[in-house]
Amino acid sequence: MFFKLSDMLNFAIGANDGTAGRLEDIYFDDVLWNVRHFAVADAGGIGTQEASLEPKDVTGIDFDSRTLTTGWSKQEVAEGPDISADLPVSKQSGGQGDPHLRSVKEILGYAVMSTDGEAGKVIGLVSSDDDWKVHFVAVDTGEWNNNRTVLVAPGLIKPVDFDKQEVHLELDHARLKASPDYDASAPILKDEDVKLAGQEHV
């Protein structure tokens, strides 16, 4: 199943013995485009403790109850890796840390730049709980394109400029305008169901 990672923010963490916190943020690799960590606030349900879960620790997602489940106990979540040991660039100090670790919260709203100018903003990273890779980037193209939303493959994105808060595409306005719409209400079951920006003639 595919979904926007940002839709999971603030989900409860469901341990095998109760609620073990809430999902504060999701950290991803901006080169490999995969999820690395789930940042858990109130880890173990014991106050301000912050911890980390990895994709392999997740056993399920329930969008109806807004819960991310794990096979760990509340105590195991609380005693899990401290999320402060591996922070995204936006939270690092003195350039110490992984230069490719990024925050889902951080990238939302970044300006999207085509090869011929500003083209919209990032409104989501679309992933799957089968592999926790970022398969698509959802872009609101704005008024110039009737506020249509399109999906862009990470392979068409140049290195993200996190200083300028810009995502640069290897596509021009014409190709974005000719791209199929993304309907967030229509479930995506597999990659083959999706027509991406830049594949408008496929």
Image (tube, grey):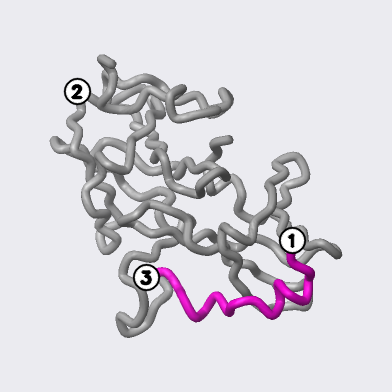
Give the structural element (helix, strand or loop) at label 2.
helix
Disc 1 to disc 2: CB gap under 8 Å: no
Label 3 vs 1, first from the N-terminus: 1
Q: Nearer the viewer, mark 2 or mark 3?
A: 3
Query: Magenta segment: does it hold 86?
Result: yes
User: Residue 165 occupies which quadrant of the picture?
Assistant: bottom left
x and y percentages locating residue 168 in the rendered image: 23, 46
Q: Which residue is mark 1?
A: 71
Q: Residue furthest right?
A: 17
Marks 2/3: CA distance? 33 Å
Q: Amino acid at mark 1?
A: Gly
The front one of 20 and 173 is 20
Give the structural element (helix, strand or loop) at label 1.
loop
The front one of 145 and 123 is 123
Q: Which mark is residue 25?
A: none
In the rendered image, which quarter contains the N terminus?
top right
x and y percentages locating residue 110 in the rendered image: 35, 50
Q: Nearer the viewer, mark 3 or mark 1?
A: 1
Q: Which residue is mark 2?
A: 174
Q: Which residue is mark 3?
A: 89
Label 2 vs 3, first from the N-terminus: 3
The number of numbered discs placed on residues in the rendered structure image is 3
In the rendered image, which quarter contains the C terminus?
top left
Q: Residue at x 52, y 79 (%)?
A: 84
What is the magenta range?
71-88
Left or right: where does residue 160 sit relative to residue 69?
Answer: left
x and y percentages locating residue 24 in the rendered image: 60, 63
Q: Is residue 103 above or below residue 149?
A: below
Q: Is residue 56 above or below residue 202?
A: below
Q: Residue at x 38, y 36 (%)?
A: 139
